[in-house]
Image: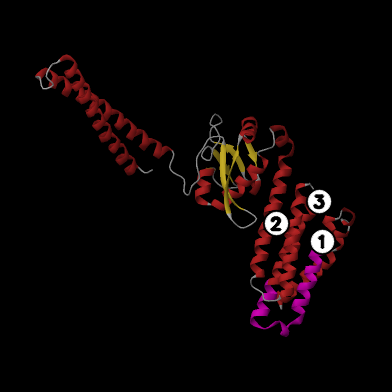
Amino acid sequence: MDNENSFYTIMRGVFAGCGVLFVLLLALFLLTSLTTGQSLFAPEIVQLFVTLFQISTAVFGGLAVFMLFLAVFTKKKNPALPGSMVVKDNVLKYEYIDENGRKKKKTFSLKNIDAYLNERGSMDIILDAVLSKNDPKEKPNIRSLMIQFPKKEKKSLAILYKEDPDTYNRIASFLDRISVKDVRDLQDHLPRYVHQQDLLDQGEDLVRELKRRRMATDDSEVKAGIDAVNDRISEMKTLILEGGNNDKLRKLYSYYVPMLTEIIDNFVTIESHEGIENDPKAKEKLMQTFDLIGAAFETLRDKQKEDEFDQLEATAQTIEALLKQEKNG
């Protein structure tokens, strides 16, 4: 509610209250007149009625002014957040996209996170950010929790939500995930949880990039290859949370899959401008890369094949060399 609406709401309440007060005093004096037999219009009765009404109205008006001042002060201290994000102590609310692509909201408890912050003062979280409280004595909420990114000024989560809702939702989603961990668990395993979430987020970013490229091609085999890679990335979520070989998976996400997206881009460019029949090797190289990526994922799924992961490096370097050669050519 803004200041103007607050003023009109309070003033309507004042007039309504005065009306009710007038009716009640009139009923009281009428009842007194009937009981005592004294005329309601006697000068002393009228004067008493007027005096009591003035006093009551003055008190009522003073309360209204105080309420208006309080509303304005609260508005300045706690400006409204955009959207429907509610400010509430000890909980945090965020938006996420479910498996069906629908936007939903979720609220979770900050009890364990607050206990960790009270003990440690700050918390290293995803995106290389640091979470803390503006005042250790404050209860945690979207305004009192502060976030600081590398080489950036510290700001509240409320400001982050206003400036960058996607980043806010990503951070809140991570905090939701670790909110069920007690303080001891967070002290012992927080770096691992951060590492896992970074990989999960990186995987989701890659899926979005690959889906965008899927829409840009008409080749059914390429579409099927992209779908297969996205399926493998989804399967990796379980491996990540179980604490598999995340270092190799990070290399796969940071090196192999980005290389694949670059090859897909080259293929799409040739397909749309020159026609793939003019450069049949472009598709051959792309399908070879799909096989490489598939084999890399397979080695991570099967612990007995993990040693084969490094053997794929030579093939990846060959493909990368061909990419550089094409760029320079």
Which residues make up the magenta segment?
265-294
- Please tell me how crowded label 2 is: few (under 14), some (14-19), or many (20+) other residues with Cα within 10 Å: many
Occupied quadrant, residue 318: bottom right
Amino acid type for the residue under numbered disc 3: Asn
Counting every numbered tag in the picture gives: 3
Q: Is residue 77 left or right of residue 289?
A: left
| Position in image of residue 197 (x %, y %) | 69, 48
Quarter in which the C terminus is drawn: bottom right
Distance from disc 1 to disc 2, alpha carbons, whole Å, reads 15 Å
Marks 1/3 in contact by CB < 8 Å: the verdict is: no
Q: Would you name the residue on which mark 1 appears?
A: 296
> Is 61 situated above or below 232?
above
**Upstream in the sequence, badge 1 or badge 2?**
2
Is 303 magenta? The answer is no
| Label ID, residue 245 | 3
Amino acid type for the residue under numbered disc 1: Ala
**Upstream in the sequence, badge 1 or badge 3?**
3
Nearer the observer, 328 or 24: 24
Q: Is residue 202 left or right of residue 3?
A: right
